[in-house]
Image (tube, helix red, strand yellow):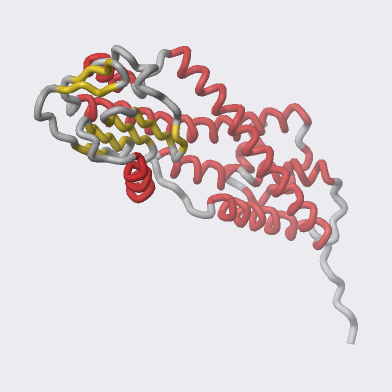
Amino acid sequence: MKEYILIGFRYPQRLVRAKNMTRKQVFGYFALLTLILTFSMTSVLTNVMTNLRQDGSEIAETIPPFTIENNQLNVEENQESYVHQTNSFLLFFDPNGAIQTEEIDTNLERLNVPIGIGLMQDEFYLSVTGRTIPVSYDQLDGLNHETFIDLLSQIGRFSPLVLLLMFVVAYLASGLVLLYEWLIVALFANILVTLLRLRFPFKKNARMALVSLSIPTLILSLIEAFGFIVPFAFEFKLGFTIYFLFTSLRAVAPKKKKKDD
């Protein structure tokens, strides 16, 4: 297994040797690449949760005293309407009936904020990533500012069990992504083998394709783990894997005989 890890991450020009991997080694290598993808995805999710927790705490500090009774938002006299925006939230506090839900939708789309909350005169509004979640004041009867602040403060906080579950889900999702990428690269490897007049069966081409994904997967995972989004990431990965495969296969391809004059 160590030999194939070195080929994948240090000597991609020797990829043709990966065709001799055993089935057990293939499963092990797939699990390794999936783990790399999972750490990247988990890092992204952790950053999102951290931002949600920080933004939730910031929003909580601005909430004035209120209660919800009889399907109505009740506040102290002379409480003005206001809007508070963070990277994750757009809060509309409107006890005076000055804001319409259409205005909230427009601002969420314009500002590209994932979560919108509207504490309005006689209506509660909640939108998450563009989807409105139906919640009425009748369901929130008795809610006050202290309870609402507690709810905001809990956003982004998870128990160790939930974090473990999130890791497991991320691992399964990463495995599906890698499986799709592996299939595409394996098909291209099969085409390259045919063009170079090599006689490797598809299962051996698939083994080489899997190992060829090593360096692009590691590079992109590291970049995304730091919170950067790589445009055309799959195309970037596909281009590098095809280059590695072509370089390795060309070295063992039969040479064309020169015709005598």
Residue 11 vs residue 105: left or right? right
- Residue that protrudes farthest toward the front in the picture: 70
Q: Nearer the viewer, residue 72 or 61?
A: 72
Check the image and report above or below for 182 versus 168: below
Q: Quadrant of residue 50?
A: top left
Which quarter of the image is occupied by the N terminus?
A: top right
From the viewer's perspective, is 131 left or right of 206? left
Give whichever of 195, 181 is nearer the camera. Answer: 181
Residue 131: % across, % down: 47, 37
Displayed quadrant of residue 248 = bottom right
Quarter occupied by the C terminus: bottom right
Which x, y percent locates residue 18? 73, 42
Query: What x and y, as percent, mark residue 92?
Result: 26, 35
Residue 249 drawn above or below residue 177: below
Left or right of 107 on screen, residue 238 = right
Given residues 92 and 220, the one toward you in this image is 92
Q: How many marks?
A: 0
Residue at position x 57%, y 27% in the image: 171
